[in-house]
Amino acid sequence: MVDWASSFNGLFIPARSFSKGSINQESVGRPSFRMTDPPEVVIHVLLGDSSANGNRFIEELRDIRSLFGYRRCFEHACIDYDKLTVVLNCCVARIRHFAFHSAYGGVFLSKGGGSHCLSYERVAEQFTRSISRSELLVLNGCESLKLAGILEGWAKAIVCWPDRLTDAQAREHAKAMYEGLWNGLNLEQALASARGAIDGMEDWEKPVVIGDERWKLECS
């Protein structure tokens, strides 16, 4: 995996500097990272440490990219545990999609070729230090309602999970929700559609929204 964000040694990266980036040339089949004149970035996909199950993240990313297209999708994978703020400042995006594994009250991010469990409080601190905010934040990981509660107000709306989930459920939810938003549904309607697409869960276990449920994606 290429952790190119760490190569900047924590230096500030101006928002909207880049249009898109490559995270793993071999696994996702696209060109390496390059600087261009950026179009509007609609969705910024952040992938936590994938050493436990990288396939889920790759598949989730492919689903999102197939819907939004290369030029609207900006990506980072294997984010270093102390570089999250730097990564958030790399672009301005209407949506941030953060896919991660979570346990022990924290989020797994990369550290020295392995994993490091960073507490929700420290993850939230790195979010709040960023100057680049988004309208919609999707926290696609186990028990992310706890992190969303700390981050309330960072975005107009936050989608999160109250309980644990499988990799398949995380992917099913993301794919169905974004399809709904892309097709003109508001967040409440898109989430209702996504909740119906998730198998093997009680209603109370399914994702919820903190913030504006009427938020709508308007994208040319």
Image (cartoon, grey):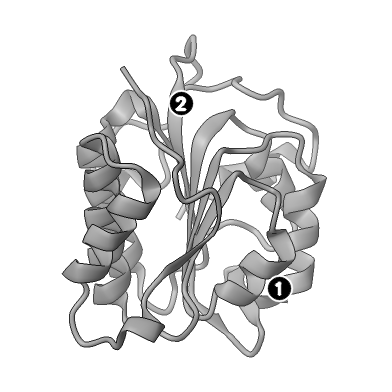
Tell me the tag on residue 193. none
For residue 208, which quarter of the picture? bottom left
| Residue 115 in view in this figure | no
Q: What residue appears at the point 49 percent right and 75 percent down from the top-left corner?
A: 101
For residue 116, which quarter of the picture? bottom right
The 10 Å Cα crowd at callout 1, few under 14, some 14 to 19, many 20 or more, is many
| The C terminus sits in image quarter | top left
Q: What type is the residue that disc 1 sits on?
A: Tyr
| Residue 145 in view in this figure | yes
Specify whether 110 is left or right of 193.
right
Residue tagged 2: 41
Residue tagged 1: 120
The residue closer to the viewer here, 71 or 155, is: 155
The 10 Å Cα crowd at callout 2, few under 14, some 14 to 19, many 20 or more, is many
Specify whether 90 is left or right of 128.
left
| The N terminus sits in image quarter | bottom left
